[in-house]
Amino acid sequence: MEVRRKKTSDAWEHFQVLANDVDHAKCVYCGTKIGCKSVNGTNGMKRHTERCKKAPFYRDKTQTILDFESRTQINTDGTVQTVSVPKLWRYNYDEIRKALAKMLIVDELPFAFVERECFRQFCKVACSEFVTPSCATITRDCYGLFIEKREELMNVFNNFSSRVCLTTDTWTSSQNLSYMCLTAHFIDDNWKLHKRIINFCPVSGHSGELIGKSVENCLLEWNVKRVLNVIVDNASSNDLAIKYLKKFFNLWDGCVLNSDFLHMRCAAHILNLVVKDGLKDVNVSVLKVRAAVKYVRSSPSRLQKFKSCVEEEKITSKGLVCLDVETRWNSTYLMLKSALVFRKAFKNMKTKFSPYTKEHMKQPVGGAPDDEDWDKIQSFLPFLEIFYNATLKLSGSHYVTGNTFVEEIYDIGYTIYDYVSDPNDDVKKMAKQMKLKFDKYWANVHNINILMFIALILDPRNNMKYTEHIVRNSYDVSSSYTLCQRIQDAFNSLYESYAQKVESSSTNLALG
């Protein structure tokens, strides 16, 4: 006699086996038959149970669930009772206007957007009770929201216990007006990284003293006195600005170690200068490719001719060439990389379309890119890709990058030294130019900000021995010994500085 095993699946709580058909089971709620062979399993029965409308626990997924909130209720006998009642949407005109102001700011929409016909019609359909504000009213709302957020940030600066790292930059607009932007980077008491622009203002010039005074006035306005360092690019005026800032920072007692490590040079900007120096010898080839890209993108008809050349050469790339921003070498790298894919198409344009060749002859570079130019670009593009990837890592704004500076920069240094002996003469010449610029900033161990190495040491994945290993592989014996000693001394001094403040605060707390 065959002994049947006990059915252990939860699905059998809602099904029963048919007496005349052991291969099927019937739903106890709606009577639907579902296959129940052991080879099929019980998944089909479980799926049916979930969607069976006659089951007592069935819930339509399209039906919304009521949200409840707690309210205090006073009974007739005077007793107070907390009850749960359905939480209903309540019309709040002020909150809607505040959300609208935030939308205009975050999405960078013009104030006049609120007076456009379709937006007003949308508001009528979405919430007929909401009266759309005028352009002047929403302007005041945006300014009011700015004041509110500004006060919140000032409270954060006044109450949190960490230090602030500052980044500042100045530039001149097309209207010949100079501006300065000051950004604060800090970690709050919950160990969350923040980045806030605390000033964007016109300045009367780019001199170091003017920049220093502008930063000073901004910090006084925000009452920010605990500063770790100031990150600037490598303009000579910034050296004077840092000297000016050191004076009043020391008066505030707001920096560590007498502001010795206040000046932090922008690592991404240094890489930018290194690459630009390397590109000088191949600049003509780059200019030719840029002119070719600019030509095919200058009108729809030219772009269509270029696409026809792409089809003739059977190039399957889904993208097209992109034009760069001449002051940003990263965009130049992307332009060269995309153009190299369409090398045969550009050569086809040069052969079949005489206007393309004539237009390039008018350019100062003297003609369209030839095979020699494309070969040069193809040879040094892998070299540039290393710089491109490093710049992306160092330019991150949503994560801490200080602990990666040393590794990325010295990896670049090793790469440059390797390419100095490259068999390709063009690559070798480029690497030599880059090495000269790289050594200007990193060869002298006395000009390096030690905080970069301390950030590397404090990374839990690293330690002092790892840092010393990088230093010894990058310098000669004398220089590496000097730099390692500077790192050790700075690390000890920094620890003692913080230890004294912790001890002092503990003593004050005990006395209080």
Image (spheres, rainbow, N blue to C red):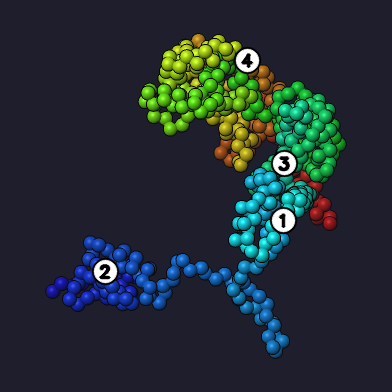
Residue underneath mark 3: 197
- Which mark is drawn over residue 80? none
Residue type for callout 4: Leu
Cα separation, mark 2 vs mark 4, equals: 78 Å
Residue underneath mark 2: 34
Cα separation, mark 3 vs mark 4, equals: 35 Å
Cα separation, mark 2 vs mark 1, equals: 60 Å
Vertical side of 133 occupied by 500: above or below = above
- Which mark is drawn over residue 133? 1
Cα separation, mark 3 vs mark 1, equals: 28 Å
32 or 235, nearer to the observer: 32
Crowd around label 1: few <14 · some 14–19 · many ≥20 (10 Å): some
Earlier sequence position, callout 1 versus callout 4: 1
Screen quadrant of the N terminus:
bottom left
> Residue 23: x and y, percent?
20, 69
The secondary element bearing badge 2 is classed as: strand
Image-quadrant location for residue 402: top right
Which one is in front in this view, the residue at disc 3 or the one at disc 1?
Answer: 1
Earlier sequence position, callout 3 versus callout 1: 1
> Residue 154: x and y, percent?
78, 49
The secondary element bearing badge 4 is classed as: helix
> Residue 300: x and y, percent?
51, 28
Image-quadrant location for residue 391: top right
Screen quadrant of the C terminus:
bottom right
Residue positioned 82% across, 52% down in the render: 508
Which one is in front in this view, the residue at disc 2 or the one at disc 1?
Answer: 1
- Which mark is drawn over residue 436? 4
Which one is in front in this view, the residue at disc 1 or the one at disc 4?
Answer: 1
